[in-house]
Image (tube, helix red, strand yellow):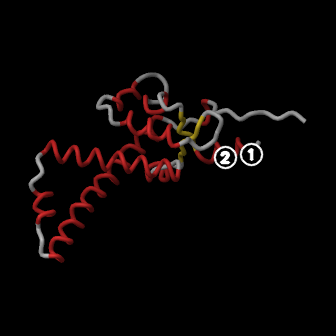
Amino acid sequence: METKEFTVTDDLLASKGKRFLNLIIDLFIVYLITIGIGAVLNIIGKLTGSYSLSSWIVSLTLIENVFFGVVVLFFYYLIMEIYLSRTFGKYFTKTLVVKYNGTAPKVKSIVIRTLVRLIPIEAFSFLTGNSRGWHDTLSVTYVVNKHEFISKMKL
């Protein structure tokens, strides 16, 4: 019996529109998480009577706020994609992160994906002809349409 190894083909790749929607949804979720962290620190301050954490959050400069948001963004993508191979944006658009052979990416690939996302001009890498950005190509991962991917994997 002959066994064929599965490979991700171009017809399985998520469109640029879905990828953009993933980005918008994920940035909104990161924004909510960041606000949530600030709110929790304020609540802790009110409950304990120590306002040092809440006053620290309020006194952050613009640069410090951006850095805080980048840290939240890093851990959001890292945790979601390591454990689920998806983010909330990918759940909404029914897409999934996989390796070339259809398996889930290893931690090293996800760390590379996440670090490359932090490059300020990385989002512009989608303006080229293909629908894979730098964080896909450098980590050798693919974002595919989940249902088409699963049905093709079964074949």
Q: Quadrant of residue 148?
A: top right
Residue 94 placement, left or right of 74? right
Numbered mark located on residue 3 in the image: none
Could you tell me the amino acid type at mark 1? Lys
Between 109 and 16, the residue placed more toward the observer is 109
Q: Are marks 2 and 1 in contact (CB under 8 Å)?
A: yes
Residue 116 placement, left or right of 99? left
Mark pair 2, 1: CA separation: 6 Å
Q: Position of residue 47 (x, y in %)?
A: 18, 77
Q: Say if 22 sits above or below 29 in the image.
A: above
Q: Quadrant of residue 120?
A: top left
Could you tell me the amino acid type at mark 2? Ile
Q: Position of residue 49 (x, y in %)?
A: 12, 75
Q: Position of residue 90 (x, y in %)?
A: 48, 48
Q: Quadrant of the N terminus?
A: top right
Q: Which residue is mark 1?
A: 154
Q: Which residue is mark 2?
A: 150
Q: Say if 143 sits above or below 35 in the image.
A: above
Q: Position of residue 78 (x, y in %)?
A: 42, 47
Residue 40 placement, left or right of 108? left
Q: Quadrant of the C terminus?
A: top right
Q: Please tell me how crowded label 2 is: few (under 14), some (14-19), or many (20+) other residues with Cα within 10 Å.
A: few
